[in-house]
Image (cartoon, rainbow, N blue to C red):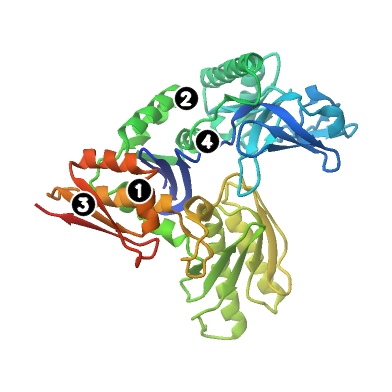
Amino acid sequence: MKELVVNVNAKEKRVAYLQDGVVKEIYYERASEVDYTGNIYKGKVQRVLPGMQAAFVEIGLEKASFLYVSDVRDELGGDFEEDSDEDNKNSKSWKEAPQIQNLLKPGQEVMVQIARGPIGTKGARVTSNISLAGRSVVYMPTWNKVGISRRISNDTERRRLKAIVKKYQPEYGGIILRTAAESLTEEQVKTDIEYLVKTWQDTLEKYKNNRGPTLIQSELDVVLKLVRDTFSNDIEKILIDDKEEYEKIMSFIELYMPKLKDKVHYYRGKEALFDHYGIESEINRALGSKVWLKSGGYLIIDQTEALTTIDVNTGKFVGRSNLEDTILKTNLEAAKEIGYQLRIRNLGGIIILDFIDMEKRSSRDKVYAALREVLQQDRAKTTLSRITELGLVEMTRKRTNESLARVLCEDCDFCDGRGYHKSRKTICYEIFRKVLKETQGVEGSRVEIWAHPMVCDLLNGEEQYSLVELEKKLLKKIVLKSDDTLNIEHYDIRIEEG
């Protein structure tokens, strides 16, 4: 059973993807930390770097974005031919490799789309090959082919969908049929195409009438984006705990997938939604550096700016037969857990796995096969090298957003060796949820929040309005109590019962 569980409040939106009751992926979007991926801008070339065949483009964000020569669309220069592989939307091979200095000049205005949002100290990566995603199709104004998802395997269905798209394909641009297009009617696909073409026309109009750098087209928020990209017949339920968000999702589904509206439910339970599903505890578990395995072994996960390392240890597990079997069992269990941790922590970039040394080639092959199998379930693209004799594996996982730790934590001196702790903002939001939970059905006129001074400062400052709104909602006075003996992640909520 696959489910989407959506928790919404004024400050953040959180979505958990569950499979058979197990949390597989977590998505966050905060009002103060917007995900820019998919946004379209009228940018201005700031600097051209011939040595790197790239350019910095100012789009109005804090850091300039980075545009590689391969992401500069052909209308800006260059001559390319399309590959015969219809499933690959980026399948272009240059007849003559263009030079960035011949395509772009400082001060030049250009339309770009964020392919990867700002991460850490790096600015966004952008492309001028624009793509507009709908429920069933992706419209690519700078492309000129019809493609179809490889996951639609039925040949008859593939031919039917291609015929529909060619019938309604606009004069300019290409169409990619998404997996969600399978079994949709001609009218549904047609409506999707027409909506995206109209969106593109509006985007062009905004580009002409506005001076850069400026935003000209926004992507959907994290909730609607996930509904659009993942909600299909194999997801049995979407549960939302906010009435306004529920109605917004229902309106979206009525437009794009009306047959699935019975799967969307408004949560009315007394217990907080993420607590009810055990998601809060899984989030906290995913922030620790040590992950215990059922056998008694454990993983040590260390995330740095350059790469992530995952070290496998036997720990308390001593086995029942010989050493090789003990090591093999630990490594097989670790391979499965690594696949899970990569997804729930949203770890990306270069990842080094350090399995326990295995003498037998057959043992290494078994662990490699187990790792490949679990990674095939990951929606993010991964590459994987063979296991060396030292038990090392080099792999990559496509990184489009910040990892869970970078979203929820910050560097500090109270980390117990992790190198980071939950950010003050994360702790404030936890406090708001905890106060709401613990005051339900409790009489009393006063709530005391005991917290670290740094957390109290944020509650008294940037989050003061939220605190006032919480008081109005609860009809209770909220009093902050600063306690510098508390760990920054620890707090206490006391309610004076009437």
Disc 2 marks a residue whose amino acid type is Tyr
First reached walking from the N terminus: tag 3 or tag 4 = 4
First reached walking from the N terminus: tag 4 or tag 1 = 4
Question: Residue under circle 1?
Answer: 459
The span from disc 3 to disc 1 (Cα, nearest Å) is 14 Å
Question: Residue under circle 2?
Answer: 256
Residue 426 point in image, percent of width and height: 42, 51
The span from disc 3 to disc 2 (Cα, nearest Å) is 45 Å
First reached walking from the N terminus: tag 2 or tag 1 = 2
SS type, badge 4: helix
Disc 1 marks a residue whose amino acid type is Leu
The answer, for residue 20, to whether it is visible in the render is no
Residue 487 point in image, percent of width and height: 38, 65
Residue 59 point in image, percent of width and height: 65, 31
The span from disc 3 to disc 4 (Cα, nearest Å) is 42 Å
Point 14% across, 55% down: residue? 496
Instruction: From the viewer's side, name the closer residue of 126 and 182.
Output: 126
Disc 4 marks a residue whose amino acid type is Asp
The answer, for residue 455, to whether it is visible in the render is yes
Is label 3 in contact with label 1 (beta carbons under 8 Å)?
no
Question: Residue under circle 3?
Answer: 447
Question: Residue under circle 4?
Answer: 229
Point 61% across, 42% down: residue? 118
